[in-house]
Image (tube, rainbow, N blue to C red):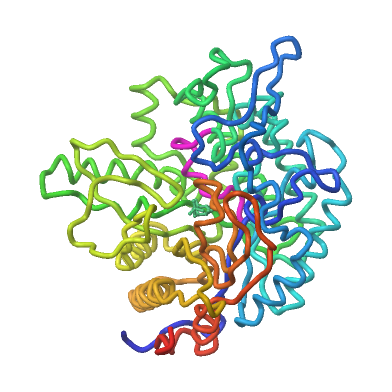
Amino acid sequence: MSESSFPKNFLWGGAIAANQAEGAWLEDGKLANVTDTVIGIRSEYPSIKWNEEKNLWELNLDKDKAYLSHEAIDFYHRFESDLKLMSGMGLKAFRTSISWARIFPRGDESEPNEKGLAFYDQLIDTIIKYDMEPVITLSHYETPFTLLAEYGGWTNRKLINFFINYAKTVFKRYQGKVKYWMTFNEINNAFQNPYVAGGMLPYPPKHPEDPINDISESDIYQGCHHMFVADALATKELKAIDPNAQMGVMCSFSPLATYPNNPDPENIFGTLQFKRNSFFFSDVMCRGYYPGYVKRIWKEHGSKPDIKEGDLDLLKNYTSDYIAFSYYRSTVYDKNTEMGGDTGGAEGIENPYLVEKSPEPWNWPIDPKGLRYIMNELTDRYELPLFIVENGLGIDEQPNEDGEINDVERCRYLKMHIEAMNEAIQDGCEVIGYLWWGPIDIVSAGTGEMKKRYGFIYVDRHNDGSGSLERLKKNSFDYYKQIIQSNGDNLEIPLNE
Ligand code: BGP
């Protein structure tokens, strides 16, 4: 690897999300958010039902199922000791989300829930106490469920004001403490997951028995337009309240590492069009206008959203300061294959040039060069600072008979992706930081399981909900500490790994 080129103030850190770590899903006034209604965000159907006479959706939890995220790893009560433990790695930054439904439990209240605000006072102050930069996501798939149940979620323009009321409340409350904000986690997943990622639900439903498939392409473009306007207005409010703070777009950009299967011109153009499914979101939020290629889709599909007077000026005037993104894997596009997707990114066909995969049963291709590739492409397209706010490896692992976890695979994954990032920086990419997804084991977003462990710290909780919740350092804990202490210079994996 060439000489390390990380800036001296590079933000090495970790990232989690409220809904995957906090638990306390109904504590201190919080009401359900959309992730509380599913086992995992890839769940086939949410645990909800339509109430005809009340004309609203209701929770309908399956008592035979374990909703692990409802208790998660109890970060809500253990954040002080967890952050102290994590600070032992020398983390410079810590990303999490504010759970919107702790601040506005229904989402449509005019006054906030003081207990919710007080919790995040303590959490953010503790992050700072341990010398970490708080990096805050306003909604990590966490739209308050009531806003879907009684309004249809983001398909309803009223959500813009509800969101701005929430955003202004927290910008003011944590003013001067939070420098890096981002609005919607992986907003570009809205099409593949309109319910959880898009926060959308048909209201009233045409097919109450199949709510997710009841959401049309037009609904989703309309919901995305409302989120774009909300993002622009939130950026405007942030600048007014805290001029030193920055607002980022946040996308799942593994899909940008999609390679054409062969030089067939149809595959070349098909790959470009596939990648535009993701570029669409960062184009609007970083360039500030709707690109021509989406106008063609609207025309051909009749799915143009209703755009109000003043909306386009907001988009133009309040674009993102930086690009936050997750990167896990790459994939291959072929015109004869239907593209799938999951929380790690797009799923096309096998890449015979990639030999390593994440462990069974997930088998995500490991492609650090894909990270360098998309960092260069994003820099060429936007010339904005990049912030890798999710990258990691999920492993089904347990302590050995000596109570140790020798997670050398995780160390190798980390090493390879830091090397790729180092190359990208030397290619001219400006990078704010690198946040490992799940520095402590948390509940998997995709499957709602505990067994998919990302952490440098093990948490004794299992898929059946059992476990002591005790925390245990894995070998990778000291490895990441070594990397941070050397500012990315010393990537040697110690022999005992
Ligand atoms: C992203 C989400 C995170 C995280 C990650 C890993 O989509 O932003 O919430 O969970 O995916 O996915 P999983 O937890 O399914 O392995």
Question: Residue, x 49% and y 40% (percent of image)?
Answer: 42
Residue 373, quarter of the rendered image: bottom left
The image position of residue 333, as x and y in percent, is 23, 45
Q: Which residues are magenta?
A: 182-194
Outermost residue toward the left? 264
The image position of residue 55, as x and y in percent, is 72, 14
Quarter holding the N terminus? bottom left
The image position of residue 406, as x and y in percent, is 46, 77
Q: Is 285 placed above or below 150 here?
A: below
Outermost residue toward the top? 53
- For the residue pair 239 and 419, the one nearer the viewer reads as 419
**Magenta run includes residue 190:** yes
Q: Is 35 placed above or below 90 here?
A: above
Question: Residue, x 61% and y 60% (percent of image)?
Answer: 16
Question: Residue, x 50% and y 24% (percent of image)?
Answer: 215
- For the residue pair 6 and 314, the one nearer the viewer reads as 6
The image position of residue 298, as x and y in percent, is 39, 26
Q: Is 467 placed above or below 93 here?
A: above
- For the residue pair 32 and 458, the one nearer the viewer reads as 458
Outermost residue toward the front? 401
Residue 317 placement, left or right of 4: right
**Magenta run includes residue 145:** no
